[in-house]
Image: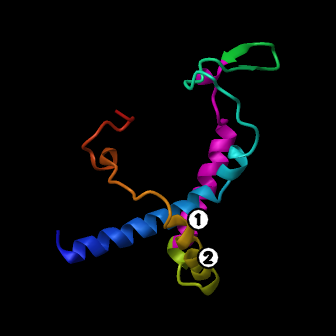
Amino acid sequence: MQMNQEAEKRIAANLAKTMAMLCVRNTHLETIHAGKTPVTRTGDWSDVTVVDAAGNRIPWTDVSHISDDQLRHLMRDIVNRLYTFHLCADEPRLRAEIERWMAVAGQWDEPEIDQRMIGTGNAHGG
């Protein structure tokens, strides 16, 4: 692989991880993620149920873990942050935030090409 391609991949990886941190992780997703995580002894969550207000026992694997309103709020937050990132990345305060979070995001696993996005895989995870 040519050096230019290696540099391009390195830059794209750093940018993707930084955008994920600033534009996805530090959003309403943190609110959704907050709270207590149930314990599973089987590891596949088949031993965990939720009891709703009507007394229905719902297997954890069948429970929706995010409401439509939460998803709408999350997606609006992510789109606004991506938009801001693209339009304002050169502004000093955002530039400082980008540089601060690049160090943290740099510790994440290296990204891989998602074949589903370019039409060579099943678009729904298969």
Secondary structure type for disc 2 = helix
Please state which of residues 107 and 27 is positioned toward the viewer in this rendering: 107
Q: Residue furthest bottom?
A: 92
Q: Which residue is mark 1?
A: 22
Q: What mark, if any, has residue 97 been given in the picture?
A: 2
Rendering quarter of residue 42 = top right
Secondary structure type for disc 1 = helix
The CA span between labels 2 and 1 is: 8 Å
* Image position of 88 with respect to 46: above or below: below
Residue kind at label 2, given as amino acid type: Glu
Q: Quadrant of the C terminus?
A: top left
Q: Position of residue 117 (x, y in %)?
A: 34, 48
In the picture provided, is 124 more to the left or to the right than 29?
left
Q: Position of residue 113 (x, y in %)?
A: 32, 53
Comes first in the chain, label 2 or label 1: 1
Q: Which residues are magenta?
A: 59-85
Residue depicted at 49% across the width and 59% down the height: 108
Q: Are marks 2 and 1 in contact (CB under 8 Å)?
A: yes
